[in-house]
Amino acid sequence: MATLSDREIIALSRKGELVAEEFMDGSVTPNGYDLRAAILRIDGQDLEGGTVPPKTHFLVGTLEYLKLPDDVMGQIWVRSSYARRGVLGSFGAVDAGYHGTLTLSFFHSGSEEFQINKGDRIAQIVFHRMESVPEKTYSQRSGNYQGSRGITVKGSN
């Protein structure tokens, strides 16, 4: 497995792959892409931005619509600027072949509130090219979230 570089991320995204919608050059890192907040859900309320109080679970829907090729998967990391404030993230891998926005789950363990606005860079995704194409794609295995937009909480366990 190899990590995609900034050059590969830009080239694939400009072809409508990886970051297929809402791609921004300023979000590219040497080995990843910073995902931006589109919508924030706190206590069941959807907001385009808002204050996150301490000791609060919150969800963020990404601006970016991903379109991963069948041989590329993603790993998500909390941006260090949020981690330093006590924000923890619980993320799964983004399966090869996934198409859609992402719903990211966070917990603010810190003691001071902070603001998240639409467009803020909240997490980094690192893309990895797999050594081979899987036998069955994401949509063939489950596809529970294929084509998702906004914040999605449905799906099977």
Image (cartoon, grey):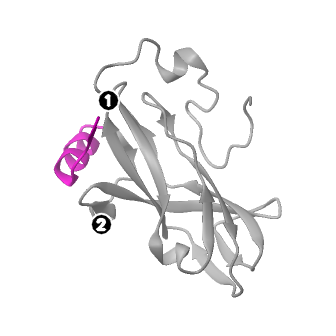
Q: Residues within 10 Å of mark 1 (few under 14, many from 20)?
A: some
Q: Quadrant of residue 61?
A: bottom right
Q: Residue 79: within the magenta? A: no
Q: Is residue 72 left or right of residue 80?
A: left
Name the residue nearer the viewer: 79 or 45. Answer: 79
Q: Nearer the viewer, mark 1 or mark 2?
A: 1
Magenta stretch in the rendered image: 1-17
Name the residue nearer the viewer: 141 or 1. Answer: 1
Q: Residue at the location (58% across, 49% down)?
A: 91
Compare marks 1 and 2 and give the one earlier in the sequence.
2
Q: Which mark is residue 65?
A: none
Q: Quadrant of residue 6?
A: bottom left
Q: Quadrant of residue 128?
A: top left
Q: Residue at the location (46% across, 44% down)?
A: 65
Q: Residue at the location (24% across, 40% down)?
A: 12
Q: Tell me the SS state at disc 2.
A: helix
Q: Does 26 sit above or below residue 51?
A: above
Report, in whole angstroms, how far the alpha carbon at label 1 lies from the one at label 2.
Answer: 26 Å
Q: On the rendered image, what quadrant is the C terminus found in?
A: top right
Q: Which mark is residue 130?
A: 1
Q: State the residue lying farthest toward the bottom.
A: 112
Q: Amino acid at mark 2?
A: Gly
Q: Amino acid at mark 1?
A: Met
Q: Residue at the location (25% across, 47% down)?
A: 9
Residue located beneath label 2 in the image: 26
Q: On the rendered image, what quadrant is the N terminus found in?
A: top left
